[in-house]
Amino acid sequence: MSTRAIDELIWTALTDPTFRKHLLNGQRREVLTTLNLTEAEQQAVLTVEADTLETFARALCQPGIFRVQ
């Protein structure tokens, strides 16, 4: 997953409370369509299990879990 994609996703979650709520409450697939992510990036994000934005962001940034470019 590219650094740009992670930045866009986390920035949107930080600045948009509705996006953040949907990202963490089971409506993730719907809100991901609003971002410019590749299909592979969307699938990677859908695999994350987290109930807080901090946990979510940490999972995206773990070495070896996603390829960061």
Image (tube, rainbow, N blue to C red):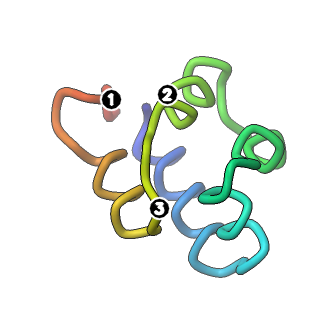
Q: Earlier in the sequence, mark 2 or mark 3?
A: 2
Please determine whether, in this image, residue 32 is positioned above or below residue 55.
Answer: above
Residue 3 rendering spot, x and y as whole percentages: 40, 45
State the CA–CA distance, disc 1 to disc 2: 7 Å
User: If the image is split into quadrants, where does the C terminus sit?
Assistant: top left
Residue plotted at (41% across, 56% down): 56
Viewer-nearest of discs 3 and 1: 3
Q: Which residue is mark 2?
A: 44
Q: Secondary structure at mark 2?
A: helix
Q: Earlier in the sequence, mark 3 or mark 1?
A: 3
Q: Are marks 3 and 1 in contact (CB under 8 Å)?
A: no
Marker disc for residue 66:
1
- Furthest residue to the top? 40
Asked if marks 1 and 2 touch (Cβ < 8 Å), the reply is yes
**For this view, does 58 lie left or right of residue 20?**
left
The answer to whether residue 54 is above or below residue 69 is below
Residue occupying image coordinates x 69% and y 48%: 26
Against 37, is 9 above or below? Answer: below
Quarter of the image holding residue 16?
bottom right
Q: CA distance from mark 2 to mark 3?
A: 16 Å
Residue name at image x 29 percent, y 56 percent: 58
| Residue 57 - label | none
- Residue drawn at (74%, 66%), measured in percent from left and top? 19
The secondary element bearing badge 3 is classed as loop
Badge 2 amino acid: Ala
Q: Residues within 10 Å of mark 2 (few under 14, many from 20)?
A: some
Determine which residue is flagged by label 3. 51
Q: Answer with mark 1 or mark 2, whichever residue precedes in sequence.
A: 2
